[in-house]
Amino acid sequence: MTSEATPAERLPALPEERLDEAQKAAAAEFFELRRTPVFGPFVPLLRSPELLRAANRMGLHLRYNSTLPLRISEFAILLVAREWSQPVEWHIHHPIALEAGLDPSIVAAVAEGRRPERMAEDEAAAWDFVTELQRNKGVSDPTYARAVAAFGETGVVELAGICGYYGLLAMTMNVARTALPPGARSGLKKLPD
């Protein structure tokens, strides 16, 4: 029996004594805004302090000030995590999605890479929009119209923003090989090509 070794993190946390002034300032701002030290996807982003700052502010808006219902924004985040096979993103957002009211059968289908069988109208609109955007790099007129009917124009822009923002985090963590917290399991496996 062979076991697949987990590759080493490429961009692990930097020791505080190695941070330059810009990194220290970005980490302090992060703590001030989130009340937690730099973690997960933000660890590799700390190498680019201004990118970390911009990403942090965008993330705070999309997580806490979006016009989308939390259940829908978390659903979209899980769809992005699934698209990128990103275990840390999945680990963080899976429990939030369930707590926000997303049906466990929907979450299970997403984890397996398949369209959920039963979704509310707004969930189906979000699924179609996010899936089409990620796979086709755009959305058709019917998909756009359905999303606008469900979420309004602001919601559609924020749904696209969630795809872009969490795509950025997923790509960054995949490049950095960001590890799950010790003892954590994401429940998300890489899908076959």
Image (cartoon, grey):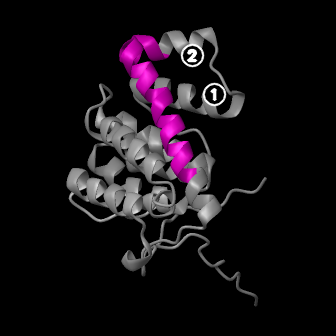
Does the magenta run of residues contain 172? no
Q: Is residue 155 magenta?
A: yes
- Which residue is at the far front? 21
Q: Which mark is residue 31?
A: none
Residue 102 higher or lower than 188, as above or below: above
Tell me: residue 137, above or below residue 52.
Answer: above
Amino acid at dot 1 = Glu
Query: In the rendered structure, which disc, 2 or 1, sits on the residue that comes first in sequence?
Result: 1
Identify the disc placed on residue 132: 1
Residue holding disc 2: 143
Residue 175 horizontal/vertical position (percent): 64, 60
- The residue type indicated by label 2 comes to Thr
Q: Are marks 2 and 1 in contact (CB under 8 Å)?
A: yes
Count numbered badges in the picture.
2
Which span is picked out in magenta? 147-170
Residue placed at 60% from the left, 64% from the top?
A: 176
